Amino acid sequence: MAVALGIAAAKLVLHLLFASRYGFFGDELYHLACGEHLDWGYVDQPPLIALVAWLVRHTLGESLLAVRFLPAVAGAALVLLAGWMARELGGGRFAVTVSALATACIGVLMVMHYLFTMNAFEPLFWMGCAAVVICIIQTGNQKLWLWFGLLAGLGLENKYSMGVFGFAVVVGLLLTPERKAFAKPWIWIAGALALLIFLPNIIWNIRHDWPFFELLRNIRESGRDVALSPLEYVARQIFLIGPANFPIWVIGAFYLLFVKKAKPFRVLGWAFVVTLVFFIVSKGKDYYAAPAFPLALAAGAVAIESFTAERWRWLRTALVALLLVTTLIFLPIGLPVLTVDHLLAYVDALPFGVPVSEHGHAAARLPHHYAWQFGWEEMVAATARVYSSLSPEERDTCAVFGNNFAEAGAIDLLGPKYGLPKAVGGHQSYWLWGPRNYTGKCVIVLGDELEDSARWFESCEVGAELNNPYARPQENRPVLLCRKLKYDLQEVWPQLKVWN
């Protein structure tokens, strides 16, 4: 485990070194804004990320390093947990090392643990539940299901897809002798505990007419997400998890499901397969299954260690070398180790395009998780120039309207140093927070085309141009100064709802 701890520490240092290289990601701006409106739910997410955002701002601060510190810690903890799982599955030093290293080298998790989003903490909840299952199998102590219930409940308050992994574990129990757990009260109490922890968010959704389901319906009808066939989905996993990791997790799944030595842990093999199949069938985004892969990698490391114990030991060195080399090659995609100009040259030199999970992401020159970090300072500064050009009387009544939650969030986070008021918007939870006291007499509009906004106002003009070469096209739309909304903003607000 000392080796696993060293790998985890290296991953933590790597993330912290490059945490501040670019700017805030759009989702980060939104989560920080949610932290200023603490509630038991939001249109597109449960409440835990907003609470963490509030805690971070009131303890560590608002810098990029402060905001991204906990995701980096979560990534290091996941690496350590992966090494522990390999040991508990029967692995020795090599298995623990490969499990920890392979998990640290998962490409998509590098992105997740680089940014302050729900995705950073989701793998830790999933694998924490898997670790509890391992302990139950080893000790026979059914009371440990209470820890599973606690982690699952908190995981549901972090991201709803925790329910998918919980469902997959239940299926695994039913398909194996571990179904005996249902004859005892503890797993049922654990389920009740998870439900109790999750209940406030359920009540919030009921009170707000289930906005998350409306959001899912809108996304499906809009065709926003890239739909993948089963083969395409698996191929994406090879890229996202890492080419060198592909044989490890395939071997791991086979080991858990079919090898006699791993029979006690077969429930985890089924949990992995059911999770992957669920997202394939439901047309989930390509990275949705990623939190389950450390489990398969841990099992694969154990299997490879056993297979090479007496022969072909050179494969061990080759595997570690392959993991390190391929990770170094693809590292600039996951972490901002390059300056942005060098990153553009790197992306242009790749013999393939970086896959996108939404059609709109293809419009930017950079991968989405980088492109949505640029343009915010320029946008907020330009908005401040337009705002300061108004008379004092007009500034008192002028709203700043962001067409998406990131634009509004940028104003909320970066605007105070320019003297800007908090933003309003119709996107996701910003719509729930309402127009405050604004009437529409004066509105500075962000992220919209002039002709589209002009339909709503008696006059509308370009207040400032934006042209960041690295930002998404939408964040380069001009800052618009619009006056005299044709309708009272308070009355027309229901029509401005955009949940997508």
Image (spheres, rainbow, N blue to C red):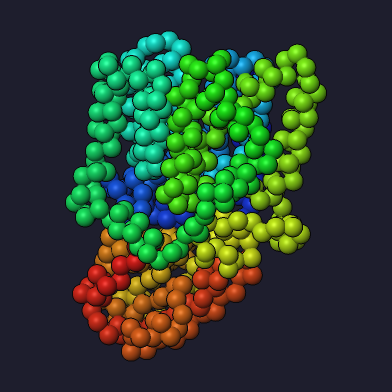
Q: Residue furthest left?
A: 207
**Which residue corresponds to the image point at 35% horizontal and 86% vertical from the top-left?**
455
The percent position of residue 278, horizontal first and vertical second, equals 43, 42
Position of residue 500 relative to residue 385, above or below, is above
Horizontally, is 304 left or right of 166 in the view?
right
Determine whether 72 is above or below 221 in the image: above
- Indicate the quadrant containing the C terminus: top left, top right, bottom left or bottom right: bottom left
Task: Return the x and y of residue 199 as percentages of the image width and height.
Answer: 24, 38
x 60%, y 56%: residue = 355
Q: Give the residue displayed 74% in from the left and 30% down from the top.
A: 319
Residue 77 visible to the viewer: no
- Picture residue at 39% right of the left edge, 17% below the top: 177
**x, y percentage for residue 460?**
40, 86
Say if residue 40 shows up in the picture: yes
Residue 194 lies left or right of residue 374; in this view the side is left
Which one is nearer the viewer's eye here, 227 or 454?
227
Question: Where 141 falls versus 387 (above or below)?
Answer: above
Give the number of marks. 0
Q: Which quadrant: the N terminus?
A: top right
Q: Residue furthest right?
A: 314
Q: Quadrant of residue 389?
A: bottom left
Q: Is residue 102 left or right of residue 214?
A: right
| Position in image of residue 127 (x %, y %) | 48, 30
Q: Is residue 274 left or right of residue 361?
A: left
In depth, the one of 282 and 287 nearer the eye is 282
Q: Quadrant of residue 408?
A: bottom left
